[in-house]
Amino acid sequence: MTDEAEILLARHGRLGLITLNRPKAINALTLNMVRIMTRALTDWAADDRVGAVLIRGAGERGLCAGGDIVAIYNAAKSGDPAPVAFWREEYALNLMIANYSKPIVAVMHGVVMGGGVGVSAHAAHRVVTEGSSVAMPEVGIGFIPDVGGTYLLSRAPGELGTHLALTAGRAGPADCLLLGLADVFIPQDRLSRIPDDLRDCGSHDQARAVLAALSAPAGPAPLAEARGWIDAAYAADSVEAIAARLDGLPDLSAQAALELLRRHSPISLKVTLRALRKARALGALAPCLDMELKAASTCLGGHDFPEGIRAAVIDKDRAPKWAPARLEDVGEDQVARYFA
């Protein structure tokens, strides 16, 4: 393929290489990219010459910043349902990665958000570096964690995943390991060795051994130190109760979390909390993806999603006008629509 291709596919020994190749857009996903990855993984699953797969991003900025939200904004404003078709294929790819018959190694270097989490955090072997910054920041644009984000975050220890989802927070490498979003820390200057070291890989044990040999200690996880107040606050049954608990805590980090909470879409916060609790009960990725597709489709036809994109990306005024504007004005019937 040429350097202009959105996805670069290659073989290195028995290793299939998938390189997301839109570095100027931090490798944001398009439908074409989803389809190329799906075809490649389908072909390689049946090819005995391929023993393992490596997913990585071109450029230094990150693996993938998510989907093309400008295109989603234009579709939402015009009533075009195309994003739903995109999400359906994207989520199917996420599930394929999670259930893949051969080892998939995902390098989660740099910015990894939204759809980038979907094509990496479901892999069997997930690598973070000192530059990793992983987030599901959807509540900040009137959306909900998708691409299996509710499944991943609901399985994090205690209420750490709830905290990350409702604050739209970013996790560094050590926190990713703590949250269960990654498996191994490898310093950035060793990443170039991964393809050569995996070129003869044909099993999960071999992949683990290779990555372990390149690994190093990730250092302390900041969220581990905050676990006490996070679990106490986010175990509440409603977003209002979580906010009240945060407001009553003297910890400065809890107060900072409360301020973040207050900036985000009230309806997205309530739907996200409901989705996380449901995902915990569902206990498997596939039904969580089904739930997320219903909720995402409802977001597309709502007010807050296009308004959140407008404020963050189109006009960049960082002043979204949420509707409803207050948590207490979001009724149970409004939340239930997202799960109908």
Image (tube, rainbow, N blue to C red):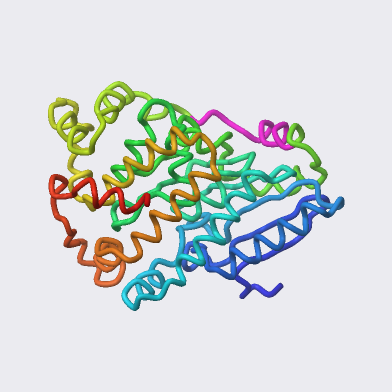
The quadrant of the image that shows the N terminus is: bottom right
Residues drawn in magenta: 207-218
* Magenta stretch: dominant secondary structure: helix
Relative vertical location of residue 65 with respect to residue 52 in this rendering, above or below: below
On the question of residue 264 being in view, the answer is no
**Residue 306 within the magenta-colored segment of the rendering:** no
**Residue 210 within the magenta-colored segment of the rendering:** yes
Provide residue 296's location: percent of width, then percent of height: 40, 57
Provide residue 199's location: percent of width, then percent of height: 79, 47
Q: Residue furthest bottom?
A: 78
Left or right relative to 321: residue 194: right
In this rendering, the count of numbered labels is: 0
Residue that appears at 61% across and 47% down? 106
Provide residue 201's location: percent of width, then percent of height: 79, 42
- Judging depth in this view, the residue of 31 and 29 nearest the camera is 31
Relative vertical location of residue 18 with respect to residue 336 in this rendering, above or below: below
Provide residue 241's location: percent of width, then percent of height: 18, 32
Residue that appears at 19% across and 50% down? 263
On the question of residue 302 being in view, the answer is yes
Residue that appears at 24% across and 49% down? 333
Residue 255's quadrant in the figure? top left
Left or right relative to 90: residue 226: left
Residue that appears at 46% across and 62% down? 67
Left or right relative to 335: residue 246: left
Relative vertical location of residue 320 with respect to residue 184 in this rendering, above or below: below
Residue 21's quadrant in the figure? bottom right
Relative vertical location of residue 300 with respect to residue 164 in this rendering, above or below: below
Q: Residue furthest right?
A: 48
Residue 31's quadrant in the figure? bottom right
